[in-house]
Image: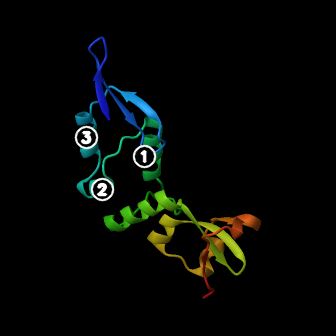
Amino acid sequence: MREFTCEHGNKYAEYTCTECGGEFITDQSYADALMEYQQEFSEQERVTAPPAFVCEDCYNKAMEELNVNCHCGRPLHYQNKAIEMMVKAMVRRQGEYVRVTLEGRTWLVQRHYIALHGIRSRDLPFLGFQEVTGDAAESPGKSQLKSS
């Protein structure tokens, strides 16, 4: 972040968004941005997510991802904050859904649902997850379940 003062005496900062790589100018100083970061995130969250300068669009996208509901319809209902943070990090890296295949059928199953509820193979066809077929079902990274 590079701070500067314009010809009218207004202070601005130029920064590169760490998510999209775009160049932006803001009227928020580095000190103000750091204070906002410390107010918005818990100490534990700050350990796993160091400060980053992101544009408004990337920030809004990240906040949407944090406000995801579980497939069961409830807001995310983790009892253990460390597990919640770990699963949210996995979702950011690998996506919200994982391909799960059972007896030749494949579904896109929400990672949060698996972490919160577990999953039994006999229940999979009845949980309401999207079933995928063809090339989509054969994508790399699918998970396999055996019948129980």
Say whether residue 70 is visible.
Answer: no
- Where residue 37 sits: x, y (%)? 28, 43
Mark sitting earlier along the chain (1/3): 3
- Answer left or right for 48 relative to 137: left
Residue type at mark 2: give it: Glu
Q: Which residue is mark 3?
A: 34
**Amino acid at dot 1:** Met
Mark drawn on residue 50: none
**Few, some or many residues within 10 Å of mark 1 (<14, 14–19, 20+):** few
| Residue beneath the point at 65% across and 75% down | 101
Kindly identify which residue carries mark 1. 63
Q: Secondary structure at mark 1?
A: helix
Q: CA distance from mark 1 to mark 3?
A: 17 Å
Q: Are marks 1 and 3 in contact (CB under 8 Å)?
A: no
Q: Residue furthest top?
A: 8
Q: Give the label, 1 or 3, closer to the camera.
A: 3
As drawn, 65 above or below 26: below
Picture disc at residue 45: 2
* CA–CA distance in space, label 2 to label 3: 14 Å
Callout 3: few (<14), some (14-19), or many (20+) C-alpha neighbours within 10 Å?
Answer: some
Residue 90 locus on image (x, y percent): 45, 63
Task: Name the residue at 41% across, 37% down.
Answer: 16
Task: Give residue 141's quadrant in the image.
Answer: bottom right
Q: Earlier in the sequence, mark 2 or mark 3?
A: 3
Quadrant assignment, res 56: top left
Whether residue 29 is situated above or below residue 7 in the rendered picture: below
Kind of element beneath mark 3: helix
